[in-house]
């Protein structure tokens, strides 16, 4: 059976990314409990990124800065800059480009978000294996690596007694011994370990060239790599072999899996009455097909066994360029003029970023999409052709395609 274990896939995700960007701009913020907050008008602003020091005090994303200060009196608060009356994410986008540039020296990279990317290391691993073997790999080369599922210990009291770094090292040593013993899946596991060597080097290069630290997951597919990345943050990487999947999946809620965090995950949980992703292994392929269709059913059947085949697509640039703004509570827009004003502000930002994108990346956008999300309401989106990078034209086109949403009727001033 093809379990897809000839591939080596990594997911790299920056640690508390916006905080690190602000700490590089202002070194006084380094090694301190620190957050990045957006807008100051209400309760000191909303927190969108939190340093690990601040997390230790119980500070988390979506708290108000004023509330967070009560938990952590010496909290440093960096502010997102504003332009066109809204948050300006330019510094974070530019930092993201720097990071992707360094990563792409090592492998084919698929940018997955502003601070993460997938890499297919299969080819690089095969190349390295022509000149090396298990015996050449030492724990010193893997100084930030965890092997998930190791150390394998039958005595839980022992595992609680040792500190995290000591346990990591013990697990890694056991993993390397397990590799050289040459079991049935040892070729696949050796490939993952060589992948981990490459990712150690890549993460060191990212830190050297950008000053930013990151975490990574190394496994046989995107789903497992993404999951592994989150297991030992910050500034660490985790190898997840197929053999460690059953134990991990036996207690892992379905929503924690890539692509199952939303509606599909909820529907799987409700339809089958199960909690953990590992519980899906008790259903046959036919059963899963009946419930979720001929595409999603078989995908779930493989997925709950740690098997998945989605390729890493070579793509370093975002597919679309967009901006948005929320108008909560009293700030809610109530006249046509206000709607037009804010559409124009958004269009001005778009115009700037589209022009920059054309100059830097030599491409031209063809479609304009306008989306509106109202509290408790279904979201609405419409698109039209984008003919010119012109804020005035984009504003009037946007207004035209969302006019039908205005329940006050177009002859009135109200919206
Ligand atoms: P994340 O990778 O989700 O989080 P993080 O990098 O801050 O922390 P971690 O170490 O746990 O990975 O998001 C990356 C950046 O995207 C984050 O620094 C700020 C921004 N962001 C928002 O602005 N709003 C959000 O709701 C989320 C999830 C992220
Ligand atoms: Ca991150
Ligand atoms: Ca991320």
Image (cartoon, helix red, strand yellow):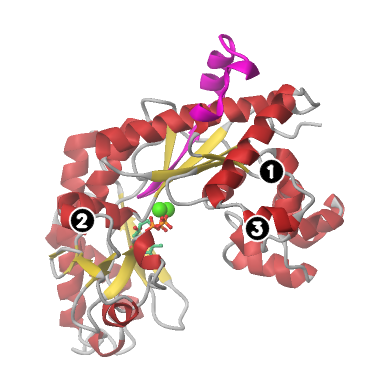
Q: Nearer the viewer, mark 1 or mark 3?
A: 3
Of mark 2 and mark 3, the one earlier in the sequence is 3
Q: Quadrant of the N terminus?
A: top right
At 67% across and 42% down in the image, what residue appears? Answer: 308
Q: Nearer the viewer, residue 329 or 244?
A: 244
Give above or below for 111 relative to 38. Answer: above
Can you tell which mark lies on residue 151?
1
At 28% across and 52% down in the image, what residue appears? Answer: 20
Q: Which residues are magenta?
A: 112-140
Q: Nearer the viewer, mark 2 or mark 3?
A: 3
Q: What is the x, y in percent for residue 339?
A: 21, 77
Dot 2 beta carbon under 8 Å from ligand 1: no
Q: On the rendered structure, is 319 left or right of 199?
A: left
Q: Nearer the viewer, residue 356 or 282?
A: 282
- For the residue carrying disc 3, how many other residues have a C-alpha within 10 Å: few (<14), some (14-19), or many (20+)? few
Q: Quadrant of the C terminus?
A: bottom left
Can you tell which mark lies on residue 160?
3
Q: Are marks 2 and 3 in contact (CB under 8 Å)?
A: no
Q: Nearer the viewer, residue 406 or 289?
A: 289
Q: What is the x, y in percent for residue 2?
A: 76, 31
- State yes or no: residue 135 in magenta: yes
Looking at the image, how many numbered discs can be counted on the residues? Answer: 3
SS for dot 3: helix
**Which residue is under mark 2?**
350
Give above or below for 2 relative to 130. Answer: below
At 38% across and 72% down in the image, what residue appears? Answer: 59
- For the residue carrying disc 1, how many other residues have a C-alpha within 10 Å: few (<14), some (14-19), or many (20+)? some
SS for dot 1: loop
- State yes or no: residue 300 in magenta: no
Of mark 1 and mark 2, the one earlier in the sequence is 1
At 35% across and 66% down in the image, what residue appears? Answer: 54
């Amino acid at each position: 059976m093809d379990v897809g274990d000839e591939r080596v896939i990594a997911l790299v995700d920056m640690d508390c990314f916006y905080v690190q960007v602000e700490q590089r701009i202002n070194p006084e913020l380094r090694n301190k409990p620190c957050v990045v907050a957006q807008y100051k008008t209400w309760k000191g602003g909303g927190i969108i990124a939190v340093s690990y020091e601040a997390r230790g005090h119980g500070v988390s994303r979506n708290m108000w800065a004023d509330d967070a200060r009560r938990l952590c009196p010496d909290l440093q608060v960096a502010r997102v800059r504003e332009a066109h009356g809204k948050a300006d994410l330019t510094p974070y986008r530019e930092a993201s480009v720097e990071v992707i540039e360094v990563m792409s020296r090592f492998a084919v990279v698929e940018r997955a978000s502003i601070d993460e990317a997938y890499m297919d290391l299969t080819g690089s691993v095969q190349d390295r294996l022509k000149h090396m073997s298990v015996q050449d790999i030492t724990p010193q080369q893997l100084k930030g690596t965890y092997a998930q599922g190791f150390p394998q210990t039958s005595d839980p009291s022992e595992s609680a007694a040792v500190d995290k770094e000591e346990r990591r090292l013990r697990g890694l040593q056991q993993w390397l011994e397990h590799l050289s013993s040459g079991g049935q899946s040892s070729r696949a596991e050796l490939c993952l370990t060589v992948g981990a060597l490459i990712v150690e080097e890549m993460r060191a290069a990212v830190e050297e060239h950008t000053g930013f630290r990151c975490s990574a997951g190394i496994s046989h597919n995107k789903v497992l790599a993404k999951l592994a990345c989150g297991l030992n943050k910050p500034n660490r990487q985790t190898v997840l072999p197929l053999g460690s999947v059953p134990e991990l999946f036996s207690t892992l809620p379905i929503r924690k899996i890539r692509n199952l965090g939303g509606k599909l995950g909820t529907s799987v949980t409700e339809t089958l009455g199960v909690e953990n992703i590992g519980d899906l292994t008790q259903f046959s392929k036919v059963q899963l097909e009946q419930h979720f269709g001929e595409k999603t059913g078989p995908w779930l059947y493989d997925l709950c066994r740690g098997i998945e085949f989605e390729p890493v697509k070579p793509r370093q640039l975002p597919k679309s360029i967009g901006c948005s703004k929320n108008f909560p509570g009293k700030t809610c827009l109530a006249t046509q003029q206000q709607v037009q004003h804010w559409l124009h502000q958004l269009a001005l930002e778009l115009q700037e970023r589209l022009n920059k994108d054309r100059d830097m990346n030599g491409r031209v956008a063809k479609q304009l999409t306008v989306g509106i999300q109202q509290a408790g309401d279904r979201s609405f989106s419409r698109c039209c052709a984008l003919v010119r990078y012109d804020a005035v034209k984009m504003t009037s086109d946007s207004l035209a395609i969302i006019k039908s949403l205005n329940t006050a009727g177009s002859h009135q001033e109200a919206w």
